[in-house]
Image (tube, rainbow, N blue to C red):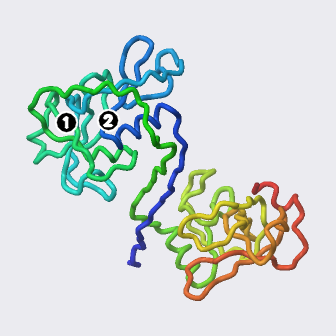
């Protein structure tokens, strides 16, 4: 039996957003160890605050301070914390209704074990030692058996408000390609491009999926395609990606390889970005030791006729 391929895969995107007056005040308040909610027209206090009333859809900006103490409304035990989570040791995810609020805030509770957590237990905020204006300024919640804390009546006015944040989104997982894509990857290591043909509709899919997405039947007949192909559609990338050593602008395109019935994507090089066009004939460029083409470059052939690739747009 051949070895099963698998590899760690990380999908990561740092999302940068500006803050309106409500979110700006909320996050700036956390930096200053103040928890702010927003009061709706019917008198409820929402924590975390929102910019529009969930019932009436009216804009709301009436900020009100709530206490850093509260009550657990529900919880779930996290026995194996992951990278980037609030605590490195097992903890509980909890919804906490802070004193003075009508809604609950999701965060971590530092507790010795699940037996120490219960709905209705009293907790308080444990502030991070260093704060910057983010939800992580609340390091976590901790059990609390004292009197409810009294808010100071802060109205959300700060001298140096936070106006924007970067929210990292990251997904770590282990990818196992399966039979069809393993064969495809093995062929790429030999600088060949292999797909599979559907026994029903006879279309060739690259990369292969092990089943025809149209007919729903298994595929097993391997077909070598390309290596040349045709640019069907493309986009010009003007924003440099973190960790990607490619100067902008550059072109990313869908490429219909000769003999394939599904366009794959790849970067176009060896030509000024503003000369890339639909119908451009291209071929792969491999680098030493790589398991896939580094980019595609023009072949010098005449452009393909539109009717030869219009079904692959």
Q: Nearer the viewer, mark 2 or mark 1?
A: 2
Question: In x, y percent, where is residue 312?
Answer: 75, 57
Q: Nearer the viewer, residue 302 or 250?
A: 250
Q: Nearer the viewer, residue 176 or 202?
A: 176
Q: Which mark is residue 99?
A: none
Question: In x, y percent, where is residue 247?
Answer: 67, 71
Furthest-top residue in view? 42
- SS for tag 2? loop
**Residue at (44, 21) in percent of width and height:** 62
Circle 1 residues within 10 Å: few <14, some 14–19, many ≥20 = many
Q: How many marks?
A: 2
Q: What residue does disc 1 label?
A: 124
Question: In x, y percent, where is residue 120?
Answer: 15, 27
Circle 2 residues within 10 Å: few <14, some 14–19, many ≥20 = many
Would residue 234 be found to the left or right of residue 195 on screen? Answer: right
Mark sitting earlier along the chain (2/1): 2
Would residue 238 be found to the left or right of residue 34 on screen? Answer: right
**Residue at (26, 52) in percent of width and height:** 129
Question: In x, y percent, where is residue 162?
Answer: 47, 43
Q: What residue does disc 2 label?
A: 34
The N terminus appears in which quarter of the rendering?
bottom left
Q: Determine the image quadrant of residue 281.
A: bottom right
Would residue 189 be found to the left or right of residue 94 on screen? Answer: right
**Residue at (41, 71) in percent of width and height:** 6
Mark 2 and mark 1: Cα distance apart in space: 13 Å
C-beta proximity under 8 Å, tags 2 and 1: no
Query: In the image, is residue 87 above or below residue 101?
Result: below
- SS for tag 1? strand
The C terminus appears in which quarter of the rendering?
bottom right
Query: In the image, is residue 263 above or below residue 168?
Result: below
Q: Determine the image quadrant of residue 300.
A: bottom right
């Amino acid at each position: 039996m051949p070895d099963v391929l698998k590899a760690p895969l990380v999908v990561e995107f740092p999302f940068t957003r500006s803050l309106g007056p409500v979110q700006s005040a909320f996050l700036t308040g956390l930096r200053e160890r103040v928890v702010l909610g927003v009061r709706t027209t019917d008198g409820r206090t929402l924590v975390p605050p929102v910019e529009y009333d969930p019932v009436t859809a009216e804009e709301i900006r009436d900020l009100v301070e709530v206490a850093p103490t509260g009550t657990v409304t529900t919880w779930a035990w996290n026995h194996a914390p992951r990278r980037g989570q609030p605590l490195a040791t097992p903890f509980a995810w909890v919804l906490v209704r802070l004193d003075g609020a009508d809604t609950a805030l999701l965060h971590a509770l530092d507790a010795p074990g699940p037996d120490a957590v219960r709905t209705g237990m009293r907790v308080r905020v444990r502030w991070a030692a260093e704060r910057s204006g983010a939800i992580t300024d609340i390091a976590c919640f901790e059990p609390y058996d004292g009197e409810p804390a009294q808010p100071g009546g802060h109205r959300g006015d700060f001298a140096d408000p936070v106006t924007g944040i970067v929210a990292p989104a990251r997904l770590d997982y282990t990818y196992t390609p399966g039979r069809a894509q393993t064969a495809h990857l093995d062929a790429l290591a030999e600088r060949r491009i292999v797909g599979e043909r559907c026994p029903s509709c006879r279309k060739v899919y690259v990369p292969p999926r092990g089943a025809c997405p149209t007919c729903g039947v298994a595929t097993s007949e391997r077909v070598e395609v390309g290596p040349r192909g045709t640019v069907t559609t493309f986009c010009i990338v003007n924003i440099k990606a973190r960790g990607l050593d490619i100067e902008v602008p550059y072109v990313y395109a869908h490429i219909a390889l000769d003999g394939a019935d599904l366009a794959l994507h790849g970067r176009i090089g060896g030509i000024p970005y503003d000369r890339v066009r639909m119908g451009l004939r291209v071929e792969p460029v491999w680098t030493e030791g790589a398991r896939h083409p580094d980019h595609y470059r023009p072949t010098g052939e005449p452009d393909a006729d539109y009717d030869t690739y219009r079904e692959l747009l």
